Amino acid sequence: MAVDLLLGLQWGDEGKGKIVDVLTQNYDIVARFQGGPNAGHTLEFDGIKHVLRTIPSGIFHSKTINLIGNGVVIDPVVFVKELEGLDKFNIDYKSKLFISRKAHVILPTHRLLDAASEASKGKAKIGSTLKGIGPTYMDKTGRNGLRIGDLEMPNWEKNYRALAEKHLGLIDFYDVDVQFDLDEMEEEFFTAVETLKTLTFIDSEEYLHQAQKAGKSILAEGAQGSLLDIDFGTYPFVTSSNTTAAGACTGLGIAPNKVKEVYGIFKAYTTRVGSGPFPTELFDQVGEKMAKIGNEFGAVTGRPRRCGWLDLVALKYAVAVNGVTQLMMMKGDVLSGFKTLKVCTAYKYKGETINHLPFNIEPEYVTPVYIEMKGWKEDLTKIKETDKFPKELNDYIDFLEKELEVPIKLVSVGPDRTQTIHR
């Protein structure tokens, strides 16, 4: 049985959580394959907004198994708070939430190390969310990490202590002022670990292999966005994992030839949180209006998102790297009321016009080349069918499909799961 992937194609915050929630009814298993609790997947239904950080977005569907794969890094403290949020709605997560034994654990000292490292960079900081994710992946690749399966071993606390002491030495090396009470942090951590151990830990790659043999349908859920990929993103202003389609294979143990559909999600415009280059960023009233209408603030961090016009150069790049088979356009409703829309179709780069994403897209090297399109003034949030779309929106979608050479199968016109229109 094939596996479908769902990925963000920009700098994250595209609305992946909502679409996973919409699609989950078609899948037996939803599996998260990378990233950590800096990712905030927002779902809204029945008048209630839910923000998930580590738990897959299929958790609100009673018949779906939710699996956290080996490529994810887990903070027990944050995770338990997520569980407590689900308790309010009587979600039976113990029977349908599984965790890979090979997933790595974020320690309290990982968070401290993250803060110390970022503080030491001064003005060159990368905009880390300070959740300890980067240092955890560093320990993973450095072969020092603590994994979920280790928590089942009798000597895990000894291993924890050795790793924590190493981190404290590194924090001293950075020689920056990071205030913390480690005893308090560790008390919360060890309590959370005990709660975590009441859930089901599994050998997830074997579980998924058997599920495929049994004909189960599987949706792999990505976090962040393709332009934040550690290899293919706007390095060094990226996350610490592979957010692209390849990350689903390494983060779940799925063979590449088992991947079928690759759903690529993008906003009708572009946003970015934190530092890093952003060619189409707007610094005027248009950008401010976009941010206000779109409520562009990070679901986890609360940080304001930078806003700009849709960048087709970057989007084509993400489509190609991921092998996207279907596109889903989010937040089309936010562009209602703009008289003129702009779309970046090329870059001026070192004196020439190019159509691909170059090695460096810092503003001193790149100037976006725009085409203009007529906007629409109609409110899209009450629309239920594509034949009610204003002509200008259809023109916008048709232009994007032609440029990207991939069909746009779904258009979101509001945050609720019902405000999702299939084409």
Image (cartoon, helix red, strand yellow):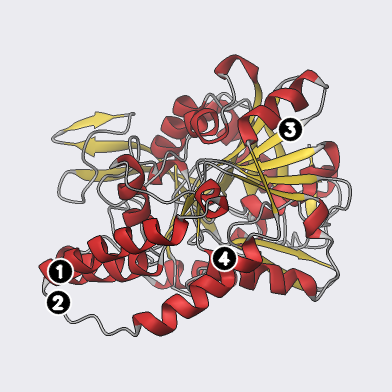
Residue identified by numbered label 1: 120
Sort mark 3 into few (<14), some (14-19) or many (20+) by Cα contacts within 10 Å. many
Instruction: For mark 2, give the secondary structure.
Output: loop
Sequence order check: which comes first, mark 2 or mark 3? 2
The residue under label 2 is: 176
Pointer 3: what residue? 218
**Disc 2 to disc 4, how far (Cα)?**
29 Å
Q: Nearer the viewer, residue 197 or 211?
A: 197
Residues at discs 2 and 1 in contact (Cβ within 8 Å): yes
| Image quarter of the C terminus | top right
Decide if residue 138 is on the left or right side of residue 9. Answer: left
In depth, the one of 152 and 117 nearer the eye is 152
SS at mark 1 in the image: helix
Q: Of the two numbered discs 4 and 1 on the same chain, state the one appearing first in sequence.
A: 1
**Res 69 visible:** yes
> Residue at 41% across / 31% down in the picture?
317
Seen from the viewer's position, the closer of residues 359 and 214 is 214
Which callout, 4 or 1, points to the residue nearer the camera? Answer: 4
Identify which amino acid the numbered label 2 is placed on. Val
